[in-house]
Image: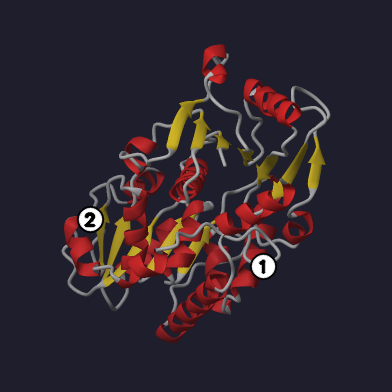
């Protein structure tokens, strides 16, 4: 099957990260993929080698050249990621091909990840198209999720094998991290309200911590609090440059605790199997609070981990408290159990292929 994926980058790398992982997984399964994206600049460091079978196309305000459409086949599956509207010319080509050859094609609205109850209710439902070149066609909602009643999560077939063969010390050395057994914590965040509190608690902790800070907003947030780059006490910092998607996985596999944000890094943190703290993307009227609590319910998060998430995400009257040893052990147990539950379910690409086959 031929797949067209449309992606608009809002203000971070997560949208493109998810779409690139999806495109790569489909192509590795033998299907050609066109990834239409309005800002592909992050691929220069995220995936500089590209992927055989994936063609990255610029999605801008310029009309698509008629000769390009004339020399390319219509997609069998059209995916609009996160509610973006695909290029009208491609939708027209898609609709015309369906009318001409009588073969069913599938139009997917790939939605945001959530553990809230509505996901199971809406997953797979049809959405008739009434306007534009696709009028008369039907989209279908496809929701990623954490249960077997959803679309599942992106996961590579060789993930477990790669994790089993991973050389933690060797990878850390390749990144210039002279690891000597201290606690490793990764930080991939926006500007968390409790960041200053976290740094202060790690500085005064009884055991040493190496904080590996990712490039971008996390680095800017920490440097604003530590202009010298050396916080002192029991805390040391390694400033990480932009890394490949595979190396971001390696970072998460290397650390004892991972601070993640958005959607793509949350999923990768779950596959890492280590305790994680999620900074959810803030929404108006604190709508993200309900979304975060639904995730914590699914995670079966211990009370100390729930409180920590609330403090990290700026919930009112929620203070950040670094866990005691027994509490941290319960965080680790919850992470391992959650990963095991997810591994027992089909991955997103498997579910997506099955869904498309049923609708075609």
Q: How many marks?
A: 2
Q: Earlier in the sequence, mark 2 or mark 1?
A: 1
- Marks 2 and 1 sit apart, C-alpha to C-alpha, by 46 Å
Identify the image quadrant of residue 274: bottom left
Eyeballing the image, is 95 above or below 245? above
Checking the image for residue 230, the label placed there is 2
Q: Nearer the viewer, residue 187 or 107?
A: 107
Q: How is the image coloured?
A: secondary structure
2 vs 1, front mark = 1
Q: Secondary structure at mark 2?
A: loop
Q: Is residue 132 left or right of residue 322?
A: right
Mark 2 neighbour class, 10 Å CA radius: few under 14, some 14 to 19, many 20 or more: few
Which residue is drawn at the image coordinates 61% and 76% (left, top)? 300
Mark 1 neighbour class, 10 Å CA radius: few under 14, some 14 to 19, many 20 or more: some
Q: Is residue 243 left or right of residue 156?
A: left
Eyeballing the image, is 274 above or below 189? below
Which residue is drawn at the image coordinates 46% and 45% (left, top)? 27
Mark 1 highlights which residue? 148
Q: Give residue 184's position: percent from left, percent from top.
A: 30, 68
For the question of whether residue 314 can be seen, the reply is no
Eyeballing the image, is 201 above or below 137? below
Q: Give residue 45's position: percent from left, percent from top.
A: 32, 40
Q: Give residue 284's position: percent from left, percent from top.
A: 68, 44
For the question of whether residue 25 can be seen, the reply is yes
Image quadrant in which the C terminus is located: top right
Identify the image quadrant of residue 316: bottom right
Q: Nearer the viewer, residue 98 or 314?
A: 98
């Amino acid at each position: 099957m031929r797949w067209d994926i449309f992606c608009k980058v809002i203000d971070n790398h997560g949208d493109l990260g998810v779409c690139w992982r999806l495109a790569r997984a489909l192509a590795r399964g033998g299907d050609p993929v066109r990834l239409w994206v309005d800002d592909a600049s992050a691929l220069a460091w995220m995936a500089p080698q590209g992927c055989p079978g994936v063609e990255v196309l610029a999605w801008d305000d310029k009309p698509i050249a008629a000769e390009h459409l004339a020399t390319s086949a219509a997609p069998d599956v059209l995916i609009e990621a996160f509610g973006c509207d695909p290029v009208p010319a491609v939708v027209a080509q898609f609709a015309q091909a369906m009318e001409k050859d009588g073969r069913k094609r599938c139009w997917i609205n790939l939605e945001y990840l959530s553990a809230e109850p509505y996901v199971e209710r809406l997953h797979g439902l049809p959405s008739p198209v009434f306007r534009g070149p696709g009028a008369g066609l039907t989209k279908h909602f496809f929701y990623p999720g954490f249960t077997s009643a959803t679309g599942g999560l992106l996961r590579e077939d060789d993930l477990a094998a790669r994790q089993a063969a991973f050389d933690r010390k060797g990878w850390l050395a390749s990144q210039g991290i002279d690891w000597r057994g201290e606690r490793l914590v990764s930080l991939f965040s926006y500007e968390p309200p409790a960041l200053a509190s976290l740094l202060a608690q790690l500085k005064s902790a009884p055991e040493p911590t190496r904080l590996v800070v990712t490039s971008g907003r996390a680095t800017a947030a920490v440097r604003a609090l530590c202009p010298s780059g050396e916080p002192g006490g029991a805390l040391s910092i390694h400033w990480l440059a932009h890394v490949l998607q595979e190396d971001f996985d390696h970072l998460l596999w290397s650390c004892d605790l991972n601070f993640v944000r958005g959607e793509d890094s949350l999923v990768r943190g779950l596959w890492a199997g280590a305790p994680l703290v999620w900074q959810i993307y803030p929404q108006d009227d604190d709508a993200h609070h309900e979304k975060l609590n639904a995730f914590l319910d699914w995670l079966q998060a211990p009370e100390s981990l729930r409180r920590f998430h609330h403090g990290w995400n700026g919930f009112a009257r929620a203070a950040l408290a670094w866990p005691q040893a027994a509490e941290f052990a319960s965080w680790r147990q919850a992470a391992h159990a959650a990963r095991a539950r997810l591994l027992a379910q089909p991955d997103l690409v498997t579910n997506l292929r099955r869904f498309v086959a049923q609708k075609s």
